[in-house]
Amino acid sequence: MKKIDKAKIKTWFVTGASSGIGKELCIQLLNRGYNVIAVARRQPNFNNVNALNLSVDVTDTNSVEKAVKKGIEHFGSINVLANIAGISSYKTFEEEQPEKVRQVMETNFWGTYNTCHSLIKYFRENNNGTIINCSSVMGLVPRVCGTAYCSSKHAIEGLTSVLWLETKNIDCRVMSIEPGLFPSNISKNEKDMFKSKYEEYQFPYTNIIKIVRDYRNDTATAMNLLIDIVEKEKMPRRLLLGKDCIQRVKYEIKTIKDNIKTSNSISKKIAIGKKDKRYKEFEICDYMIVNFYNTVNYGASLTAWAMQELIKSFGFTCLLLNHNDFWNPDLYNSSFSRRFADNFLDLSQIYNNNELNKLSKNLKGVILGSDQVLRLDYINHNLYKYLLNWVDKNTKKIALSASFGINQEEFKNVKALTAKIEKYMKNAINSFDYLSCREISGQDIYKNVFGLESDVIIDPVFLINKSKYNEITSLSTINNKDKIISYILDDNEKYQNLYKFLSDKEKIECISINNKDYNVEDWLNSIKECRFLVTDSFHGVCFALIFGKPFVCIRNKKRGNTRFDSLIELFNIEKNFVYSIDEILNKKDFDYNIDYVNNRINTIKTDNLETIKSILSSNYSNNPNANKNKNKNNAYLKRLILINYFQYLRCKILYLFCSKEKKEHYKSKKNYFKKLFKL
């Protein structure tokens, strides 16, 4: 990501500078050559020409104003405000004294308010500023014995969020940081922490103190990384510091999602006014993503997550279109895919087609991809949705790493591809602003069937930083390190014999991870740590390549053979693919040139990311006739609606007056056309 001009962040005003993370932040800033106005109630003592040490009471507005004035006089400007000052308390709500709550609120919240209020006008008039407010993971997730502290940190979250919204039109960046457990969190009066004189409020004191005392979040590393973030042109709205807080926030998000489901029906009942019954408060984001996130498939879950993280990495907000278009809803709702979606995917509300059209007017664009989202067998039941015919004509339509899953010859032989369906697809696809496919063979279909040029963008699982997968694999509870792993989608007795053969030959246990009890986290970590992978899965191969694992892939024609051909061509790994189990038994070497593959991934990744950045950030298009074709497609859809509506009326009338023998026939036809014109 682009670095900021360091002149814009040269001088820092840091509160809470005499101890803890405030002191460590000052040390790291001075080591990097920044100017630091170090303030605290007890005057700091940094012996550095770039440091101005001041005794300041942040709860006193006059004291804060004088410090700001002295800082500007001394260094000529203030560019960054870092509000770190804070105190805590460890009493239950019933036992906490009001005076103590006010004291904590005065320091934590009003201290933050006072410094922000003192500098915001200066930042606006100079059209430059950065505000970093130190909240806490407790500002997002409560803890026991946290009445005063959690309340103050929740207040800071609210204050910082409002500032973040209000400063969007001036060059002032705003971010809150939410530290987890650090050594500075330990109270000097440890014996009084989390204690209550009432039996009803007894908490596992010993366990809590042990976690606080022993947790290995390193203060120096955290502050160095914080400065790295500030040195980038774009900062996140929030920065969670510490692995412990990530898990706690994820759990809180899950709780909120559950509450939304419970509240949704109630909220609809209490709405008043003359609004359309179908009215929804549309969610605000830059891009909506359409894919198969709710297919019960490990690869589908991970490619959906990778696409989400990819779009976010460019600084855009995005949601995956949530829909009840399940292949098997009962299976999905109890599956690993559902659990993964709840914990890792940012899903929208569920919208009907009219609502989707209204929603699309507020978006920068809608992204179709990745996975086999253009495979007719998989999308024929709802072409309207998957071909993005609900998207407003002024909103970008982007096919990003979208896969047909089959080659041109196979596509033309798909049973569902009637002349009408082909025309429908052609009109829709011609209205896309940008077209790309995941496999090289997809370019032939775009060009020879639909008359369009396209790019090849590899699966997004290759395009995000490899280290991102640690967020998932670190949550695995299963250890399959150095074992032979099999992930066969269409398992049978022959494969079971193969596993036994490999296990006996290598003297290593062979474990199947095509197991509904395996979470996505376990599945991915098993491939990451395995000795050898046996698979017939496209994404199984992808992750073997990403983690540099030896593998053999049995081609699975039923699920799309051309996908493997594309990987072979891109990475020169033909010898790792076989057509039968017998070939595995007779073949000894399944190694490949890992360095070559890594270099190819990096080269392709660099090129693809540059293209995607252009697509998302500008009006870049590889379909020059997209706007004209959008109007043409809209007119075509309107004609289609009318035709289907009149066919519905015709069948409805014939149903009323036909003989008993033909009733069922016309009823079926009537319902068929009704469904079509409603789409």
Image: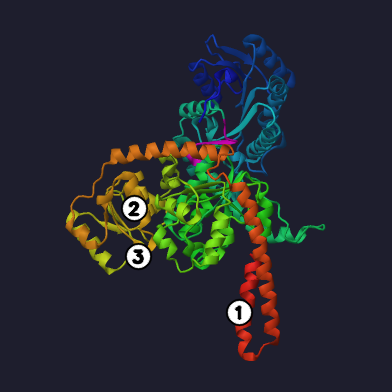
- Mark 1–mark 2 distance (CA, rounded to whole Å): 42 Å
Q: Is residue 673 above or below residue 379?
A: below
Label 3 sits on a secondary structure element that is loop
Marks 3,1: beta carbons within 8 A: no
Q: For residue 646, which quarter of the picture?
A: bottom right
62 over 678 or under it: above or below: above
Residue ID for mark 1: 668
Whether residues under marks 2 and 3 lie with C-beta atoms below 8 angstroms apart, the answer is no
Within the magenta stretch, is there residue 368? no
Q: In this rendering, would 473 be left or right of 99?
A: left
Q: Is residue 82 above or below residue 490?
A: above
Which kind of residue does numbered mark 2 sit on?
Asp
Q: Which residue is mark 2?
A: 565
- Name the residue that disc number 3 marks: 490
Q: Which residues are magenta?
A: 234-244
**Which residue is found at the position 31% from the left and 59% from the top?**
555
Residue 323, visible in the rendered structure: no
Please tell me whether mark 3 or mark 1 is closer to you in this view: 1
Which element carries disc 2, helix, strand or loop? helix
Say which of 227 and 218 sits in front: 227
Which amino acid lies under the numbered mark 3 shown in the image of this protein? Asp
Sequence-first disc among 3 and 1: 3
